[in-house]
Image (cartoon, rainbow, N blue to C red):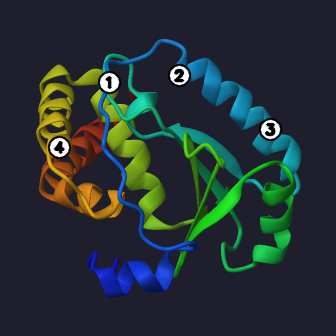
Amino acid sequence: MNPVSDEHLDSVLIGGREERPIVIMEYDADWPSRFDALALTLKVAIADVALSVEHIGSTSVPGLAAKPIIDILVTVEDVANEDSYLGKLEAAGFVLRVREAGHRMMRTPQKDVHVHVFSAGSPEISNYLDIRDWLRVDDKDRSLYAMTKRNLAQQRWADMNYYAEAKTAVISEILARARLWREGRKVTGN
């Protein structure tokens, strides 16, 4: 992954950088049902290429404060083969926002849904799922992550990607514990 810089963002963002306030709100019990409806839309639109559709990010973790943006992970065989999915997702109402090596991100015009598309086998997939699943069961790291997000949200960011990068150290720390937990579950069969 490339470090976030104005130059990098200008090369991967469709429509340029956006300065938007970061709003962190308490967990909303309606987020899972919003995901379910969106997942159905995605599955209908790209049923022939979607290998999986997962709810990721903070809105997928009950009890975790979050930006009110539903993050969705879609796995396809080859993310570079945009002809297999991009037009179909655009027809379903999503707009391409990020085009970078190994990753595409589409969003709704309202900017309240982010659809991250990766190729099968991309390491980002297990990272997203490991963190999600760990934060669902670990109160301490869920609190640490919420506090980090709230503290960072008080700052002004030239683009949301800078806010995301500022969370990297804490996410890496949490991901390390998530991986240990996941490996322990594999060994014990839980």
Q: Position of residue 34 (x, y in %)?
A: 63, 24
Disc 3 versus disc 4: distance between alpha carbons?
34 Å
- The answer to whether marks 3 and 4 mark residues whose Cβ atoms lie closer than 8 Å is no
Residue for badge 4: 177
Q: Earlier in the sequence, mark 3 or mark 4?
A: 3
In the image, which is nearer the foreground, mark 3 or mark 4? 3
Q: Amino acid at mark 4?
A: Arg
Instruction: Kindly identify the residue that appears in the image at 84 percent across and 66 percent down.
Output: 87
SS class, disc 3: helix
Q: Position of residue 99 (x, y in %)?
A: 57, 76
> With respect to residue 62, does 127 lie above or below?
below
Q: Nearer the viewer, residue 44 or 106?
A: 106
Disc 4 versus disc 2: distance between alpha carbons?
26 Å
Which of the 4 image quadrants contains residue 17?
A: bottom left
Q: Is residue 121 left or right of residue 93?
A: left
Q: Earlier in the sequence, mark 4 or mark 2?
A: 2
Quadrant where the C terminus is found in the figure: top left
Residue for badge 3: 41
Disc 4 versus disc 1: distance between alpha carbons?
25 Å
Instruction: Kindly identify the residue that appears in the image at 41 percent across and 40 percent down.
Output: 57
Q: Earlier in the sequence, mark 1 or mark 2?
A: 1
* Residue 186 visible to the viewer: no
In the image, which is nearer the foreground, mark 1 or mark 2? 1
Q: Earlier in the sequence, mark 3 or mark 2?
A: 2
Q: Position of residue 161 (x, y in %)?
A: 33, 62
Q: Amino acid at mark 1?
A: Met
